[in-house]
Image (cartoon, rainbow, N blue to C red):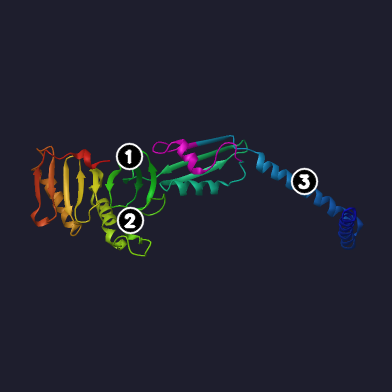
Amino acid sequence: MPNNENDAVKATREKLEGIRNSLYAKYGEKGARRVVVLSAVGIVALVALLIVIFLYPVREISVSGEVTMFNEGEIIEAAEIKEGDSIFLRSARDIKRSIRENLPLADSIKVTKTLSGTVKINITFNEVKYYTKIDGKYYAIDKDLRVLASSESGTKYSAYGAVSVRIPEVRPLEIGERIVFYDTVEETDTEGELLYEVVDEKYYAYVSDFLETLEESGFLEQANALLLDEKYDVTLIYANKYKVRFGSIANLDAKLRVLFGILEEGSTQYADKVEIDLSNPSAAIARPDPTIDFDEFID
């Protein structure tokens, strides 16, 4: 063992001497000493920089802008930063990227950091137009069926005018991703047999088509709920008074024009609750129905 240690020491010494000789040969004695000194200074500076990076903490995180639908805690959580983290480990751009990934509803995001250890986040959000309830949880969605946010309460969205939407059965939802309807994904048993008939995703295009047309029609503003879980029994709860049945969304523009005519004509204004059947727009029916319970349609 001592011989092995001596051999290792000798090999190391010879290597260092070789490096020194190379420096002397290339830069001369003074130049070699200067290189050694500068290298040592560089190493010390690097170590000091690393110490600053890892030990200089975030002392405060302040959030400004829109902090109503999403509070400061939710925004800070979405930023994936906390007090005590190194203020230099993540750039402002990286923090912005985390917020946008975790809160797709975010519109404008500005992140600044100060030498005193403060991270400042200023944020605004886009409007939430729709939300849906899946397995006891509420999800904000857009007309293209992209999932924008989640909450334990539907009032988080309805309080800001978002419309409750019922949709067909779906796969587990992921923030930032489009909804995937359950039976559009193939599943087999242990013998390789299909567990159910697989449906082409185009079958459910009526959901986003209806949402888009509704936005353009002007009827969205007073909409309360949309029942889109049945392709051929699409229903709109409107102005806390009307239950409007469209049937399928075929001839949807014509059906919306008929609906506008019925509302403008005003013959149903005296009734508290009205059912309108537009499934055949050329023979639309509007009649009072005091038995309608609007609460059952709004989650």
Q: Nearer the viewer, mark 3 or mark 1?
A: 1
Q: Which residue is mark 2?
A: 182
Residue 133 painted magenta: no
The mark that comes first in sequence, 3 or 1, is 3
The stretch of residues the image draws in magenta is 63-85
Nearest the viewer among 224 and 178 is 178
> On the image, which quarter does residue 282 sit in?
bottom left
- Point out the residue furthest to the right here: 29
Q: Which residue is mark 1?
A: 154
Residues under numbered marks 3 and 1 in contact, where contact means CB atoms less than 8 Å apart: no
Instruction: Where is residue 53? Give x, y as percent.
Output: 66, 43
The answer to whether 286 appears left or right of 11 in the picture is: left
Instruction: Where is residue 115? Give x, y as percent.
Output: 63, 38
- Quadrant holding the N terminus: bottom right
Which of the numbered marks, if any, corresponds to residue 44? 3
Task: Answer above or below: position of 208 versus 290.
Answer: below
